[in-house]
Amino acid sequence: MIKFDNITKSYRSGKVKIKALDDVSLAIKQGEFVLLNGPSGSGKTTFLNITGCLTRITSGRIWLADREISHFPDHFLSAIRREKFGFIFQQFNLISGYTTWENVSIPLLPMGVSDKMRKKRAMNLLEELNLETRADFYANELSGGEQQRAAVARALINDPEIILADEPLSNIDSENAKTVIAVLEKLKTKGKTIIISFHDSQPLITKLIDRTVYFDSGRIS
Amino acid sequence: MFPLPLWERVRVRGIQMIINNLIVTYLVCSFISLFIGLVAAFNGFYVWKKWDINSQADEQYLLEKRVYLLITILSVGFFLRLLMAPLWFFTMHSMIISIPGAMCLAGVHNANAPLSYIASALKLVLPALYGYWLILNFLDRQSEIQPFMKQKLLFIAPVGILILLEAIIDTSFFFSNPPRQVSCCTSLFDVPRENIPSMVSQSTWIWVIVFYMLILFILLTILYLFIIQKRSEYSGHGWWFENKMVMVSETLVTTFAFAVFILALHTKISPLFLGLPFHHCIFCLCQEVWDTLIFFVMIFIGLTLFIIYFWVVCSENYKNVNPIFSNNMVKLLKWSGFMLAGGLAVLSIHMVIAV
């Protein structure tokens, strides 16, 4: 379970202080599929980044599986990120100089997994996402939909407990979106916790959602 | 005037100095080491002043990033120190031909004593201090509350000062080598002097026996601590934890053991291994009997790790985090015992053969 207790996050832009999140409290149970909804700039991405230990909070407390992680040093947070979370970004964030399977297997590198095993696990996932024929293509040689599927595979390679997806269907066509949704559905049946953000309504995933959380100006409305 | 090429001894603004490739290399390493040490000491002190583990301010996060930078540069500094210790002695060795009267490192040291002896001692002390810092840092990173953070940050300052002192001494040593005839080991160590007790200057087994007794005592202590810590399943609190008196006494005993080791080498082991009954030079011993370096380094590392063990477990906050660290502390004890026993074995085998 992940629990957020009165968290705030402020950024400083020059002399202006911007509150991206303001006194947010939320508890997400294991296996829950949570949709974060709200207009652009409402704090969804900041909340996702905080959940995934990518950004520190300004105040408040966070618990992950009964451990308070708000004060953890960065190398502890890196380990948590590596073992517990899978990230799917809106812009895919693949590395263009690497092939598809290399991109997918990157999260296994700091875990010391051998090259052979990394490739094997990457190929299994690529097969599941119908990308096995693109395994040796460089990331910039893939279409938008293929890139997002590769990004999904990368998020799943370390078998994370929690999957965080920031507008994962925004830059892909409906066919590719269906493939991604099918993967998310499968993950839900496996009992994974999924937190997904969209700025608009997404009828394709409505049946999967357990709870919708609305963000507005950094607060849960 | 001197039997050496002109380029080796140069005069800069009236100051005599010896220069060769090794000296230049050493001075460059020394400069880099000084730079690393001072940057680390400055940053360490800055972070120490502002560190607040409970703070969630952005500044705290920036301080944490500085600590990661510190760890990186101090790790580089440690490996540089490891390189600089043998380089220093090689450099000193390369100066033998440039110093009239010098036949081994004793003569080179004597050309500018006591600076040279202090500089050589620092070559052993500084890697040991760096080692302590790295071990403390390794343990600190195992716990999310980072209990040794303030301690390790503050510890960099004296290390930085020592490196600065060392750089000044090294530079003074190289840059002010007076062109005079020096005495070497034969006249320094072999001829008994009235003001030095015979127990320290002549061949005697006393120090070898005291050394063996001390090392056996330390090995038995290691065994005792090892068994107690293993038995307590890492949850028990050793009576010696967080006890400053134990730390001070143990440091004194271990330092005394090392001093006795040097005396044993000087009084009996050198003449015995060199096969020259009246020659007491440790420098000649290290140059001519290669296994001396093995047991010397092993015993030095063993004693250093033994001191470090107590410096860690006697620190404040150790009890609170004991279960996380104990496994590593037992490993440290094991390595200390292994190094001491190994060094002692090499020394003993050679001694049996020599006798």
Image: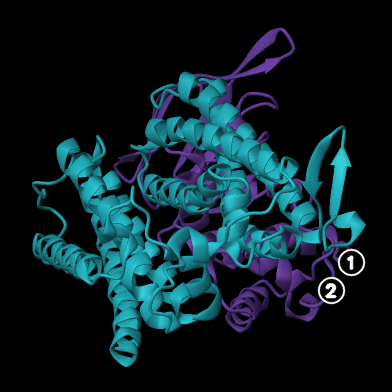
The letter of the purple chain is: A
Measured as percent of width and height from the top left, residue B25 is found at 77, 55
Q: Name the residue carrying label 2.
A: A137
Nearer-the-camera pick, B108 or B217: B108
Q: Tell me which chain appears cyan.
A: B
Is B101 situated above or below B56? below
The answer to whether B114 appears left or right of B76 in the picture is left
The crowd level at tag 1 (other Cα within 10 Å; few <14, some 14-19, many 20+) is some
Between residue B125 and residue A131, name the one nearer to us. Answer: B125
| Scheme by which the image is coloured | by chain
Q: As displayed, is residue B27 above or below residue A138?
A: above
> Mark 1: which amino acid?
Glu
Indicate the position of residue B46 as horizontal and vertical percent values: 54, 23
Front residue of B119/A103: it is: B119
Q: Which residue is mark 1?
A: A141
- Quadrant position of the N terminus of chain B in the picture: bottom right
Give x and y (percent) for residue A219: 52, 19
Let me know if residue B15 appears in the view.
Answer: yes
